[in-house]
Image (cartoon, rainbow, N blue to C red):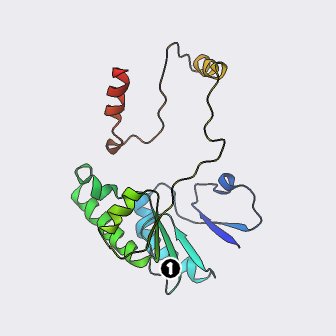
Amino acid sequence: SEFIIFEPRDCEVKKWFGNFKNVKYIKTSLLSTNSIQRYVYGLFYWQKILKNINYDILEWFHLPLINLEKKKTLLTIHDVRYNKFPHLYSLPRRLVANSVLLNSLNNANTILTVSQSIKNELLKYDSKKNIQVIYNGLENNFYYPSTSEEIEKVKIKYNINHNFVLTVGSLEKRKNLPILLKSIGLL
């Protein structure tokens, strides 16, 4: 099997995957972090680009999924946050997000998602859609307990002279960081 990965112009995706002989990387003019550009410009961009590429299956990580004339398409959806947390987003943003979601669900042959909970949310939109759950994977060596020496090196490097908790993620209201801070305070 051969694979093509389309890279945003501001990313070097090849660094993430390594040097596989059966993978080709194509640089695009799209940005990785600009969702408006990715959605609006992408509607026209992908029709043009994909016309010239022969493929059997297209896996799509970002909405919107466009109609690709009888090609098999997989769409990965990680969440439906605009609908699950509507109070965190403006009405225009929710309306656009909902429209994009419905259009993308309609155009995909198969939907992939990372949890049964998200699958259940998506089935509310289309109970007959083929939705498969594939849990996020981790490498075998992803988690290993840090030694006391490793922790001490980090504390010295960053001038930390007390116990600490490291959290990694985006600073968004829906991530509920105040609850994390209150929980740590209770500890």
The quadrant of the image that shows the C terminus is: top left
Rendered view: 53 above or below 38: below
Query: Is residue 73 or residue 64 the one in the foreground?
Result: 73
Rendered view: 21 above or below 144: below
Query: Is residue 9 or residue 66 the one in the foreground?
Result: 66
- Name the side, left or right, on which 95 lies relative to 143: left
**Residue 80 screen position, x and y as percent:** 35, 59
**Residue 105 screen position, x and y as percent:** 38, 73
Rendered view: 137 above or below 181: below
Going 58% across and 55% down the picture, which residue do you hit? 10
The quadrant of the image that shows the N terminus is: bottom right
The amino acid at mark 1 is Gln
Query: Is residue 62 or residue 8 the one in the foreground?
Result: 62
**Residue where numbered disc 1 is placed:** 47
**Residue 75 screen position, x and y as percent:** 47, 69
**Residue 99 screen position, x and y as percent:** 30, 70
As drawn, the residue found furthest toward the right would be 21
Going 46% across and 78% down the picture, which residue do you hit? 109
Task: Answer with the quarter of the image where residue 116 lies.
Answer: bottom left
Q: How many tags in the picture?
A: 1
How busy is the neighbourhood of tag 1: few (under 14 within 10 Å), some, or many (20 plus)? Answer: some
Query: Is residue 89 or residue 166 the one in the foreground?
Result: 166
